[in-house]
Amino acid sequence: MPFLCCCRQKKKYPTVIANNNAEIAKLKEQLNEKQKEINDGFEEKERINGKFQDARQELETLRRDKRQTESKLKEDLTKKDKTIKKLKDDLQGKEKTISELRARVEELELKMSTESPPSEVQPEEQQKKRPIIPSRHKTNDDVQAEKTPKSEEDRQFLLNAIQSNDILRRLSNVQIEQIIDYMVPVEYPKGDALIKEGDEGDRFYILQKGKCAVTIKQKHISTIKEGSGFGEIAILEGGKRTATVTAAEAVKAWFLLRGVFKRFTKEAIQQRDNEVMRIMKSVEKIGVTGRYQLSRIAQAVNEEDFSCGQYIVRQGEVGRIFYIIKSGEVDVTQNSPNSSDDKAETWIRVLKSGDYFGEGALRESHNKRGANVIAKTAKVSCYTLDEESFNQLIGEAVQPWNDGDDIESSPIISHRPSIIDVTLQDFNFLAILGSGGFGRVELVQMKRGNKTFALKCMKKIHIIETKQEDHVYSEKRIMMRCQSPFIVRLFKTFKNKKYVYMLMEPCLGGELWKHLRDARKFPHSRTRFYTACVVEALSYLHKRRILYRDLKPENLLLDNRGYVKIVDFGFAKELDVGERTWTFCGTPQYVAPEIILNQGHDISVDYWALGILIYEFLTGNPPFDAVDQMKTYRKILRGIDAVEFPVSIEKKAQNLIRRLCKEHPTERLGNMKGGINDIKGHSWFSGFDWEGLRSGTLVPEYVPIVNGNDDVGNFDTFHRRLTQEHVPSETSGWDMDF
């Protein structure tokens, strides 16, 4: 081992010590940094712990609040459940009370109606019966007119004016087109009268320029401005003008004559119906060939317009509508499955006016369209028929129009008495049963045998003046044919220079109009019985294709048993299978929309009137009524859904009335494939003894008191001296076969 000098060793120690001290200082510095990091970590931990504690505390608070909220909600729900249960119990109690009160009211009404003695003198407003719309038998088929050329501006002006008119805007498109085509321009200087109060109205006006003043008995009522139509009642039903219209300044107007409107709108609708029936008959897949069914379908079609490029039908969609092209052209295409373009289509063909498509929709459920149909021309008009309407009208089981129960063999029908050789001199005149503008009805008694009859005495001059000759003959012919226990029997007719006479069975229970007037309204049970009698009468008539057209309380009589019989067949008409008639007649409150709008009508108007009758029985007033006749028509055209039913009418009765008074004739109960049996089967008649009614064994709720065959106590009293008047003779010979 080598020897080391201690002096040399000592010289190295200071350097080592210095290095160590530096290292130690560095380590201390690092230690301090680490200590600081540790301290910072502890502080962060404390901070995080603090946040955690805060979050934990907040969570506990939320949980506590949640428990409190849940507890409160449960408490509230429990209270609400108790409140709902209490309200239900209260409602049930009130419904029970209402039912008891309703039953009590009906009991009192029945008691009042059976116990109240007939009053000999009634107030004037109660005695007055509703006026009828006289049937004007002129057909207008010989009316001549030419279409007046018009600029597009004038046509649009007239269209806007018609569409703003409460009545005329509800006409069909084809009728509006006819009105515009045949309107004629006219000008009046200031002060000229366009319409004079009291004159017979025959034209409708649309004012294009200027102003007109409306006066009644020289009193100013209102001012007519540009774009307004007036006098529309003249083209609907005619009659005398109720006001004067004078040009307040020089005016320009357009007018349309009633005869032109009646003829050409009728022809346009008939042409449309014939075209639809011709096409429908040729569609083998639909399989409808009978004229009655085809005419019903023609009435049910709607009209839709499509613009160029519009898809009328898309391939693959479920088809539920059948189309007939009225005007324009369409392209038929099919989607191209092999094309890279998903929208690519292959053109197939063009369809034109008179062609049809989509027929499978009416017979095949969920039938998918096999092609696209696209409007090609600027405007395409189509007649459309949907699957639901088709099935309601026709369906699988087609019912013939004259289907119905054979009530002709009913045992309560009496045979005509032996009166073949009797004359007017064989009767004593006992009392007047009724009186009106037509004449009067007398209770007469045979001088031999004491049998009584009702003798209707009609003034011949009145018949001539109101042009009712054909209707009087029609009434005689129809009533002589009818042998129903629900229709007043006609036995014989007479005539002399002043009157024609109808000898009928007497119904001494009185007019239902008077009973309703005295009772104010009938209870549901009594209404149901009277309605059932009317339904049986309509069933008998419709089976024989007889349209009644004047159903109302004034034309219903009670016999000695309390059964209802229909009388007054002045507006009745026999129709051919599938035929519609166009005469504007009836009682304003009872006319159906299609009569007002001159769209042709059939037996469906009797079902509309039946709904109105039920409503009047239950309330004492018809649902559509106003002082002004045009306002009545406007209410009718707004529809039954606009009527607020009183709470006294049961829900089932409301439903029946609404279904009878559907705006579209083909949707009315009684006029669908089930026929009048749909009415008999309605829930309002649930449990009703129809067989007992037909056999005469069903005892009515109210039986009038009749003391002998000469008792007129159920009729108003008419003093003969007050009803006597000078009646001029009429010898034109129109009644030769009467």
Image (cartoon, rainbow, N blue to C red):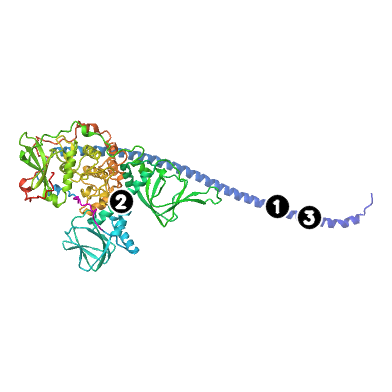
Q: Earlier in the sequence, mark 3 or mark 1?
A: 3
Q: Is the residue under label 3 in contact with that under label 2 (CB below 8 Å)? A: no
**Image quadrant of residue 391?**
top left
Estimate how packed mark 3 is, as few (under 14), some (14 to 19) or many (20 or more) residues with alpha carbons within 10 Å: few
Relative side of 398 to 40, left or right: left
Q: Which label is found at residue 23? A: 3
- Identified by mark 3, the residue type is Glu
Report whether residue 56 is seen: yes
Instruction: State yes or no: residue 604 in magenta.
Output: no
Q: Where does residue 206 sit, x and y in percent of width and height?
A: 27, 61
Q: Where does residue 265 sit, x and y in percent of width and height?
A: 28, 54
**Image quadrant of residue 11?**
bottom right
Name which residue lies at 65% across and 50% down: 41
Mark toward the viewer: 2 or 3: 2
Q: Quadrant of the C terminus?
A: top left
- Identified by mark 1, the residue type is Lys
What is the distance, in whole Å, between disc 3 and disc 1 at their CAs?
A: 16 Å
Helix, strand or loop at label 3? It is helix
Q: Which residue is mark 2?
A: 269
Q: Which residue is mark 1?
A: 34
Mark toward the viewer: 2 or 1: 2
Relative side of 249 to 456, left or right: right
Estimate how packed mark 1 is, as few (under 14), some (14 to 19) or many (20 or more) residues with alpha carbons within 10 Å: few
Estimate how packed mark 2 is, as few (under 14), some (14 to 19) or many (20 or more) residues with alpha carbons within 10 Å: many
**Which range is magenta?**
133-144
